[in-house]
Image: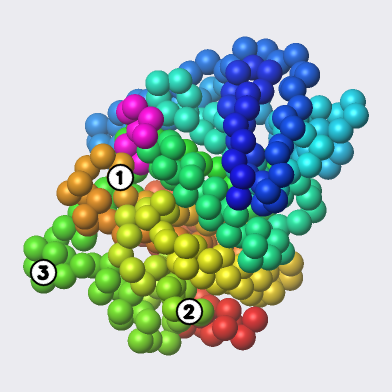
Amino acid sequence: MRKTSAHLADGREIIYYDEDGGTRVQAPDLRELPPAAPGSELRWDPLRREQVILAAHRQGRTHLPPSDECPLCPSGGDRLTEVPSSSYDVVAFENRFPALSGTEGRCEVLCFSSDHDTSLAGLGPRRLRTIVDAWADRTEELSARPGVKQVYVFENRGPEIGVTLHHPHGQIYALPFVTPRTERDLDSARLHRAETGRDLFADILATEAAGPRVVLANEHWTAFVPEAARWPVEVHVYPHRAVPDLPALDGAERTALAELYGDLLGRADRLFDGPLPYVSAWHQAPVDDPGLRGLARLRLELFSVRRAPGKLKYLAGTESGAGVFSNDVAPETTARRLREA
């Protein structure tokens, strides 16, 4: 993989990840863009002890444009996009409408392909391996930025999830705080270690790997539906070796992940009546706290609001208001359906 960095017309960074060995000739960004959006604001909720991001400038972001106006497709002729190149394999760039910006963090877009009509599931193991390498590279670079506490890599897919651009892409947030979800997970891991002397994530993996909810497994990874799944489709993917983040994966683990993840996404798309809407999120260790990094374990969690053909799960009052989830589909049933898909 060859990496090339450049800048867009308003100064934002863009990074190309090319699979061939040639030299990329970087075309200039000829757009006349307004100055970068003003910075976001973090506000502290003292009741829940959580940060809340205020990003009012995002109200004006691009919303479901027609395919011939997609800002993530390659540029060509008079059509100038966020990617000033006639083609690309994988590309990352700073979000034009970031939830976090300036001293409060950084948000990047990662485009998986120049093909507007493909999906991550259809790209094949080679491209998925390039994407895994790009995830790891962005995590490593963003982790080194001053003030960054955690790097969150994720993909939102489908209008049912709230996606505003259909081009296959994900996002990467460099956060100036550790997410509430991570803090709670690590509190549980700390308590489990104090009570048992063991690693909570290793114990979860060992239990699930021996049970009926495994969907896929290879030498380095296991994908399973968790026993207490909250969503009608929910799959967790654990590496067999305890590593804190994506950069810590070796070459064999990255290749095995690309193969298993593509298989999993293909099965997910065959479950119901069309492409599965989902959120796919990498949980990585906090950046600069050795104690927390020793407790954490890299893992992927994928979930969908689709509960049946033509039917979505909407969060009810107990779920949205009180955080008490109920699932209409048994996790064992979801695991069986994915194995058979």
Question: Of helix, strand and loop, which one carries label 2?
Answer: loop
Sequence-first disc among 2 and 3: 3
Quarter of the image where the C terminus is located: bottom right
Give the Cα distance between marks 2 and 3.
28 Å
Q: Which amino acid does label 2 sit on?
A: Asn
Look at mark 1 in the image and give the residue it sits on: 286
Q: The residue under label 3 is which amino acid type?
A: Gly
* Closer to the camera in the image, 30 or 188: 30
Q: In which quarter of the image is residue 144?
A: top left
**Could you tell me if residue 29 is visible in this image?**
yes
Q: Where does the image place residue 292, in percent across and percent down from the top left?
A: 22, 49
Residue 74 in the image, given as x and y percentages of width and height: 78, 38
Q: Earlier in the sequence, mark 1 or mark 3?
A: 3
Is residue 105 shown left or right of residue 334? left
Residue depicted at x 43% and y 73%: 220
Pointer 2 local density, CA inside 10 Å: few below 14, some 14–19, many at least 20 = some
Residue in view at x 27 percent, y 71 percent: 202
Q: Nearer the viewer, mark 2 or mark 1?
A: 2
The residue identified by callout 3 is 197
Residue 62, percent across and down?
A: 70, 31
> On the rendered structure, is 277 left or right of 187?
right
Q: Which of marks 2 and 1 is nearer the N terminus?
A: 2
Residue under label 2, please give it: 218
The magenta stretch spans residue 196? no
Q: In this view, does 284 lie above or below 122?
A: above
* Between marks 2 and 3 in the image, the one whose residue lies nearer the viewer: 2
Give the magenta range. Answer: 144-150
Classed neighbour count for the residue bearing mark 3: other residues with Cα under 10 Å, few (<14), some (14–19), many (≥20): few
